[in-house]
Amino acid sequence: MTILVRDIATLRQHISRWRAEGLSIALVPTMGALHEGHLALIDIATANAERVVVSAFVNPMQFAPNEDFEQYPRDLDADINAVEARGGHILFAPNTEEIYGDGFATRIEVGGVGEGLEANDRPGFLVGVATVVAKLLLQCAPDSAVFGEKDFQQLLVVRRLVLDLDIPVQILSCPIVRDEFGLALSSRNAYLSEEQTGIARKLNLVLREAGEKISAEEKISEVLERGESRLLQEGFDKVDYLELRDGESFDAVEALAPGDRPARLLAAVRLGSVRLIDNVPVR
């Protein structure tokens, strides 16, 4: 049975008991509104630990004033049922006051991998992610934590965070989970109309085709330019970015050579009021 926990003190009581029993613990940080992508994270967690904590916290620090914090989907009852069905042991669902108490004044900013792309288009977003993830890791003290590769820059930020701050946790990643047409699953997909969903499903197609051209040694700058034009032709309203980055350092990649470690082709596009992100590996 999955236990609903709303406060840090109770969470730590459960963690302490599990530790006393010698059990391994995994954390799956989410903002709730769980879909199959989140459930794949839980599957990885249950395969790697004896006890699994899933957090569901819509983090206000990673929303800009004009973004959808108030409208972001929330369904705690469905989340509890989903976590239980997947074998999770605790759903940790604190409110904002529990996480950011009176006078809270700390921000964690990760340089390097935390610069550019999402940091440019959503100022403060990655700072909010790094701050809340650090807090969740300290509150739960897990052996491992699982993040999805859809938010690839976020994944690299978390890895850099735990390395730099000597947080003793293994960061595991989960490949992107997609619908039958290739659209990366996201809680915000619920905002899309039927027509917009059809357009959104073109994003991964364009990315994969561009990645194949890069792998075939076509000039990267030209492939990216054509890819951006293609996205606009397919019906997207705006392309925030379409860039090829090193899969570890996150440096911009201008040329690939045989034997290079995998790069990532990343995109963020806007469709009506919805912002979609996706990425594909490029070898």
Image (cartoon, helix red, strand yellow):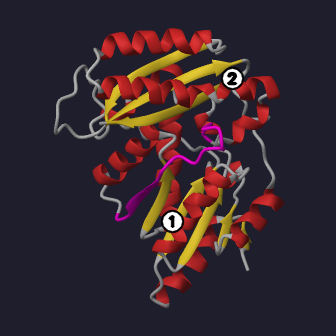
According to the picture, the residue beneath numbered tag 1 turns out to be 44
In the rendered image, which quarter contains the N terminus? bottom right
Residue 181 is situated, as x and y percent measured from the top left of the image, at 65, 38
Q: Is residue 54 left or right of residue 161?
A: right
Stretch of the chain drawn in magenta: 168-184
Count of labels in the image: 2
- Asked which quadrant contains residue 103, the reply is top right
Residue 247 is situated, as x and y percent measured from the top left of the image, at 32, 38
Q: Secondary structure at mark 2?
A: helix
Residue 182: in magenta span? yes
Q: Is residue 29 left or right of residue 157?
A: right
Please identify, in this view, whether the residue under mark 1 or under mark 2 is nearer the observer: 2
Q: Residue at x 81, y 28 (%)?
A: 194
According to the picture, the residue beneath numbered tag 2 turns out to be 199
Which residue in the rendered view is the most extreme toward the bottom?
A: 21
Q: CA distance from mark 1 to mark 2?
A: 31 Å
